[in-house]
Image (tube, helix red, strand yellow):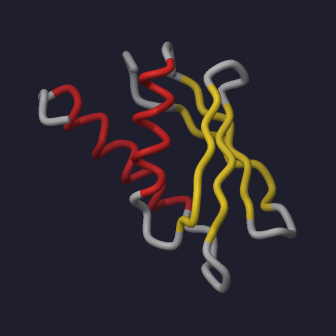
Amino acid sequence: MQSLPDIKINQPRANGASDFSIGGMTCNNCARHVREAIQTVPGVHDANVTLENRRATVRWKPGVEQDDSALDKELFRNQRQRRAGLV
């Protein structure tokens, strides 16, 4: 990933999942790092990130509200660590 992910939040689904458009990914390794970063956010049950359509589907644990700011913070923190060679 050469730049910070550009996240655009779409409407939450009724089944506890949320769809996101994520720009800035250039390879499958980028998509893997984004998925791993999303999965560290408290309340996330599972995440699926695809490079081809630059989208992520995040499933939240039952009873947990979608926390978009936590996703933004974690992706930014992960990107800073990668640039510093810590990840």
Tell me: 37 left or right of 15.
left
Q: Is residue 43 above or below residue 48?
A: below
Q: Position of residue 39 (x, y in %)?
A: 46, 55
Tell me which corner region of the image, top left, top right, bottom left or bottom right, holds residue 62.
Answer: bottom right
User: In which quadrant of the rendered image does the N terminus lie?
Assistant: top left
Q: Is residue 73 above or below residue 4?
A: below
Judge by depth and name the residue closer to the eye, 55 or 68. Answer: 55
Tell me which corner region of the image, top left, top right, bottom left or bottom right, holds residue 8.
Answer: top right
Q: Is residue 78 above or below residue 53?
A: below
Tell me: 77 left or right of 67.
left
User: In which quadrant of the rendered image does the C terminus lie?
Assistant: top left
Q: Position of residue 7 (x, y in %)?
A: 58, 39
**Residue depicted at x 75% and y 69%:** 16
The mark tally for this picture is 0
Q: Position of residue 31 (x, y in %)?
A: 50, 29
Judge by depth and name the residue closer to the eye, 76 or 53. Answer: 53
Tell me which corner region of the image, top left, top right, bottom left or bottom right, holds residue 84.
Answer: top left
**Residue depicted at x 42% and y 45%:** 36
Query: Furthest residue to the right?
Result: 14
Q: Is residue 8 above or below residue 64?
A: above
**Residue depicted at x 20% and y 26%:** 83
**Residue depicted at x 40% and y 47%:** 37
